[in-house]
Image: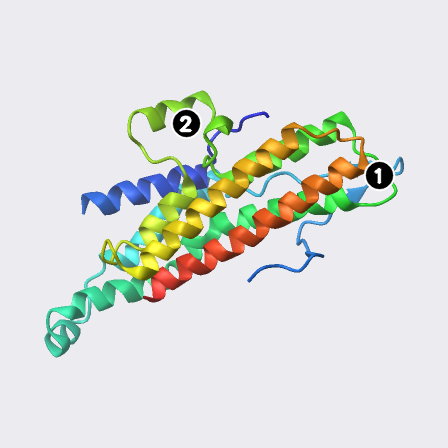
Amino acid sequence: MTTARATPSDLSLRIVSASSSALSSDSRLPVSSSPITVDRRGSNRLPPPIKISRRDAALLPFVALVPLLAPPPPAAAFSVGISGPKDWLKEQKRKAAKYLLAPIDASRENLRSVYLALTAGGSDLTVVDLGEVQKLLVSSARDCVPRERNSFVVFQANTGVEVCTFTLILKNAASLLDKNDPVKLEGEAILNNLISSFASLSGVINGMDIQLSSDRLKVADAVMDTLSSLDKFEQGVKDCLEA
């Protein structure tokens, strides 16, 4: 399978994680906000992987951190004692949740686009389309499948940097929870299942014949399984933010 460079949004999440350490399943017929267009010859045209612009990606960690760096209302710390600052921090993390969950939403839309392309009737995918499918799937995995990482990401991982975006998301969401908190442990188990699901999907797509309808449907089923795992992971992250 082809590899993809880490997107700016993924790298931004690694910056957020480093700064912190220093201080519903979808139905079988998903609806995509990025529709597949079909040309006059009947071949599917996949939309490009959903990305955040370089400017927005550069600003994202600062936007997410600004609420956390602002001082809490003076009365809060005095009225509730020592638990005040922690409760205030949890509230700020909830308010920044949409930034934290953005890569999950992008991966979901990429997977839905692949599903629609693979199940579109009346047309055969070309070799070019297979490359586009692979590109979308690699982007959706967010550097969490080792064999899909490019050389730069591999270098980062070998130096001890956490490169899996989904791992970074969970660490951020659960940073205020105790090590053995049941909600955090459940989130970690769901994360492992998600990574395994992406790895399994990678294996299926590598062994498929894109011209065979049966193979395309097999990959489509694997995509739906991964979408289900992604939805469960998103809920796990939200549970950590609310715990």
Comes first in the chain, label 2 or label 1: 1
**In the displayed structure, would residue 70 be above or below residue 210?**
below
| Tag 1: amino acid | Asp
Secondary structure under tag 1 reads loop
For this rendering, which residue is in front, 113 or 240?
A: 240
Which residue is found at the position 65% from the left and 49% from the top? 112
| Residue 119 percent across, percent down from the top left | 77, 45
The residue indicated by pointer 1 is 39
| Residue 196 percent across, percent down from the top left | 49, 41
Q: Quadrant of the N terminus?
A: top right
| Residue 172 percent across, percent down from the top left | 32, 51
The span from disc 2 to disc 1 (Cα, nearest Å) is 36 Å
For this rendering, which residue is in front, 94 or 215?
A: 215
Query: In the image, is 132 to the left or to the right of 7?
Result: right
| Tag 2: amino acid | Val
Which residue is found at the position 67% from the left and 53% from the top? 32
Q: Quadrant of the C terminus?
A: bottom left
The residue indicated by pointer 2 is 153
**In the displayed structure, would residue 73 be above or below residue 57?**
below
Query: In the image, is 150 to the left or to the right of 110?
Result: left
Instruction: Specify few, some or many for label 2: CA neighbours under 10 Å numbering under 14, 14-19, or 20 or more.
Output: many
